[in-house]
Image (tube, rainbow, N blue to C red):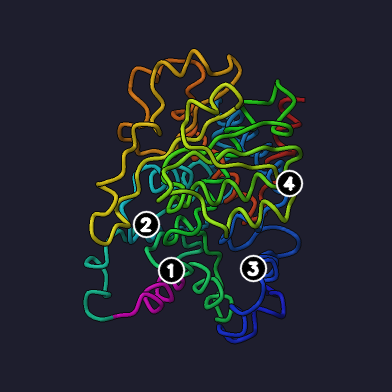
Amino acid sequence: MLVFDERMKLSWDEFHSLSLQQRAESFRMEGKVYHTIFSQQFSRHDLEQLSRLATKIRRIAKSKAGMAFLQSLLPHKRAMLYFQQPSTRTFLSFHAACPILGMKSSEVREARTSSEIKGETPEDSVRTFSSFFDVIIMRHPEAGFAEKIAWLLSNTERPVPVINAGSGKDQHPTQALLDVYTLFRSFEDRMGIDGKSLAFCGDLKRGRTVRSLAQLLTNFEDIEMYFVAPPELQIESDITDILDERGVKWQKADKLEDVVPLIDAVYMTRLQDEWDDKGESRNIDFADFNFSKKLLKQLKPSAVIMHPLPRRNEIPDEIDNDPRAVYWRQVRNGMWIRAALFATIFRRDDVISDYYETNNG
């Protein structure tokens, strides 16, 4: 029987009035992640464990025998991918991660394909999913909806883990996990993530990937962050207040070229104009917030260029073949880190580690 933190038994209003840290702690089970809702749930230890596990899974999967072992771990589990917003990489990486561990998956990608078109509430739809599936991965336009569902299902006779695959403009924790994993891989021979300088560039006000990653990076030491964006789309105080609280050095910049020589990684983002109410983003000049080819000469040889994708004009195709461009590695890393998350949620992480040590010792 699953035993949740006592705070989970509070009413939704009482639970949601708790501090974010208290709520985040309630989504764990026996010291490990259960629901994945916020990037703040993950400690440095969690990030290192997940990253190492993702690498072990990636290496085990290279052999036929290794893949057969992985696929034997969770063939009795079923995943529901409930995506109420468009998605390519997030959806497909979860979809691809499931069979690596033997899991079956189903999907509902539009309300009109479910009983919501008949007036069923999204909450009742998810309760229905929980009757058939063992984990629910959900993307929803409403901020905080995944958290509410996690609380709701934890107070039913059939609780199942909920993974937030993007909620409103606030959180995208598994994107942040794959971004951290990409940084781990990029800097594993360069003293790790500690001491690195990173620039976030583009639509930072509405970019949930930036918001989640910036918060995760506070787990590392001597990090410095630069936020490069038009004034209308600059990072806001809800994030910078957290950085100040954690003692992270940060500053805002008006042009990407001003910070490129100083950084170890640049995280580019597109204009998030799907959140416009009246097309207001069309009047913003984005010229100083694109990574042009001339900036490659100013970028450190050891630095990396990242992007959560999709992209528009902020990175031209001709940069793709530069060895410092790792955004296509990011895409594939998403599959491995999400497989590692499944393995951790369903407590198969130690089994994987034992197999890896036995066969790669």
Residue marked by disc 1: 132
The disc placed on residue 106 is 2
Give percent across and percent down for residue 230: 41, 43
* Nearest the eye: 190 or 70: 190
Residue at image position (71%, 29%) is 192
Give percent across and percent down for residue 252: 55, 42
* Nearest the eye: 193 or 233: 233
Mark 4, Cα crowd under 10 Å, few <14 / some 14-19 / many 20+, is: few
Predominant SS along the magenta part: helix
Q: Secondary structure at mark 2?
A: strand
Q: Between label 3 and label 2, give the one nearer the viewer.
A: 3
Residue at image position (65%, 33%) is 56
Mark closest to the chain's N terminus, 3 or 1: 3
Mark closest to the chain's N terminus, 4 or 3: 3
Residue at image position (61%, 80%) is 17
Q: CA distance from mark 3 to mark 1?
A: 30 Å
Residue marked by disc 3: 20
Residue 149 position (above or below residue 289):
below
Mark closest to the chain's N terminus, 3 or 2: 3
Give percent across and percent down for residue 167: 44, 61
Q: Is residue 261 left or right of residue 44?
A: left
